[in-house]
Image (spheres, grey):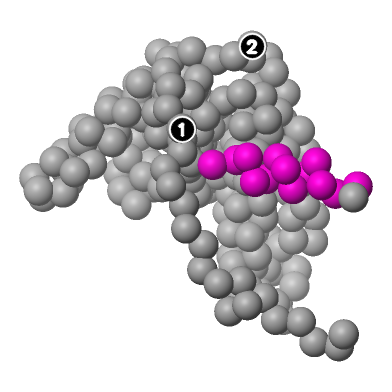
Amino acid sequence: MASDPFFDALIARRTIYGISDASPIPDSRIEEIVTKAIKHIPSTFNVQSARAVILLKDEHKKFWDTADQFVKSALPDAVYQSLGPRIAGFRGGYGSVLFFEADDDLTALAAQHAAVAPFITEWSDTSSGMHQLAVWTAFAAEGLGASLQHYNFLPPLVEKIKEEYNLPKDWKLKAQLVFGTPVGGPLDKTTKPLEERVKVFGQ
């Protein structure tokens, strides 16, 4: 079937925590993939609120060093003992893509469409998720291992990053895609019964 290669790529995309600080593709290709996703993935009313920041090599390591500092200072030691080694693993990768949504664009959109304004943020999250999946799947097809993280739960870290890279204040951080050359495979994955998850009517 014509869609099989598409689904093969989606199925091959898995969470890979074991990564090295190398890349099988050049930086220019990484930028090309992210740029294509930002340009072509759909958004609500074509608002085009998705934003991305690509951090490579030392800039990537600096981000995760900063994340480590904020996690260590903000969370109980028992929590840090769990998260610290994970953050060290992320730092050991080649790069990170930070996915943002431009809140000013969404606020303006909500003002234009008052009847659906309460749903704009939810739809924005849906669009951001599509951007994340597209880049993640493309990276996997190019031989990169990756995992999606959400260290935006610490507002001071987000503000520090926006200050560090002179990013607009209205940009809201949604997720971080950490990537590098795989040095290990994905964890075992189980699936719930599909008959509980997919319903068909009208056949």
Tell me the amino acid under the disc marked 2: Pro
Pointer 2 residue? 26
Extreme bottom residue here? 202
Residue located 59% across and 59% down the image? 125
Q: Amino acid at mark 1?
A: Gly
Image-quadrant location for residue 137: top right
Mark 1 Cα-neighbour bin, 10 Å: few <14, some 14–19, many ≥20 = few
Q: How many marks?
A: 2
**Direction left: furthest residue:** 77
Residue 12 sits inside the magenta stretch: yes
Characterize the magenta stretch by its predominant secondary structure: helix
Q: Which percent across, then down, holds residue 186?
A: 46, 38
Q: Is residue 35 magenta?
A: no
In the image, residue 198 above or below residue 120 = below
Query: Crowding near pointer 2: few (<14 within 10 Å), some, many (20+)?
Result: few
At which x and y percent is residue 55?
A: 50, 23
Residue 163 seen in this snapshot = no
- In primary-sequence order, the first of circles 2 and 1 is 2
Q: Which residue is mark 1?
A: 185
